[in-house]
Image: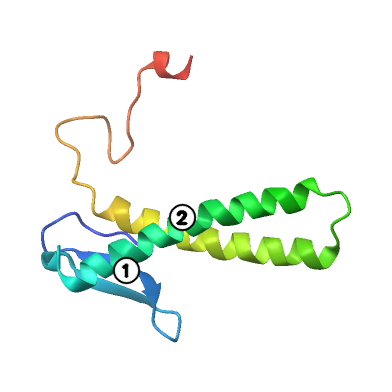
C-alpha cells in the first residue's frame, strides 16, 4: 500500500485510476470541493457494490450445480470489488489523524491482553 503522511497538505488517493492504471490523487486541501464530493460518492458506490457482489458470490458458491464459467465470473467480480474496497480503505486510512501520545512503539497499536479473551 502507498504510505502517505497525515498533514493538511497530504494527497488523497482517489477511487479511480488513469486510463493507464496509475493512481490518481487530490490535494486534501480541496476537502469539500467538487472532486472530493465526487470521490466520496464513488467510494460509497464501490462499497455498496462490494456488499452486493459478495452476496452474489455466496449464492453462486452455495449452488452445487454451478459450472466453471459461473464460478470464474463470480471470482472476477469479487476480485474487482475487493480491489475497489481496498483502495477506499487505503484512502480513508491515509486521511485518519495521527495518533496522539505514546501508544506503544512505532506505528503498531497496542491492546491490553484482555482484548484477546
Q: Secondary structure at mark 1?
A: strand
Q: Quadrant of residue 115?
A: top left
Q: Quadrant of residue 90?
A: bottom left
Q: Which residue is disc 2 drawn over?
A: 48
For discs 2 and 1, the disc positioned in front in the rendered view: 2
Q: Residues within 10 Å of mark 1 (few under 14, many from 20)?
A: many
Measured as percent of width and height from the top left, residue 47 is found at 44, 55
Q: Is residue 90 visible?
A: yes
Q: Residue at x 33, y 27 (%)?
A: 110
Q: Which residue is disc 1 drawn over?
A: 14
Q: How is the image coloured?
A: rainbow
Q: Is residue 28 left or right of residue 76?
A: left
Q: Residue at x 19, y 72 (%)?
A: 34
Residue situated in front as seen by the camera: 81 or 22: 81
Residue situated in front as seen by the camera: 63 or 110: 63
Q: Residues within 10 Å of mark 2 (few under 14, many from 20)?
A: few
Spatial separation of the CA atoms under disc 2 and disc 1:
17 Å
Q: Which mark is residue 53?
A: none
Q: Residue at x 32, y 33 (%)?
A: 109
Q: In the picture, which quadrant includes the N terminus? A: bottom left
Q: How many marks?
A: 2
Q: Residue at x 29, y 41 (%)?
A: 107
Residue situated in front as seen by the camera: 98 or 24: 24
* 65 versus 36 height, above or below: above
Q: Is residue 85 left or right of residue 104?
A: right
Q: Quadrant of residue 22?
A: bottom left
Q: Secondary structure at mark 2?
A: helix
Amino acid at each position: 500500500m502507498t504510505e502517505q503522511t497525515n498533514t493538511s497538505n497530504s494527497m488523497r488517493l482517489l477511487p479511480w485510476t488513469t486510463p493507464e492504471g496509475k493512481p490518481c490523487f487530490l490535494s486534501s486541501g480541496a476537502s469539500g470541493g467538487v472532486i472530493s464530493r465526487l470521490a466520496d460518492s464513488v467510494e460509497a458506490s464501490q462499497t455498496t457494490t462490494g456488499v452486493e457482489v459478495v452476496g452474489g458470490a455466496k449464492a453462486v458458491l452455495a449452488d452445487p450445480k454451478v459450472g466453471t464459467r459461473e464460478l470464474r465470473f463470480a471470482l472476477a467480480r469479487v476480485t474487482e470489488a475487493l480491489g475497489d474496497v481496498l483502495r477506499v480503505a487505503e484512502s480513508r486510512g491515509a486521511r485518519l489523524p495521527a495518533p496522539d501520545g505514546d501508544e506503544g512503539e512505532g506505528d503498531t497499536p497496542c491492546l491490553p491482553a484482555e482484548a484477546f479473551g
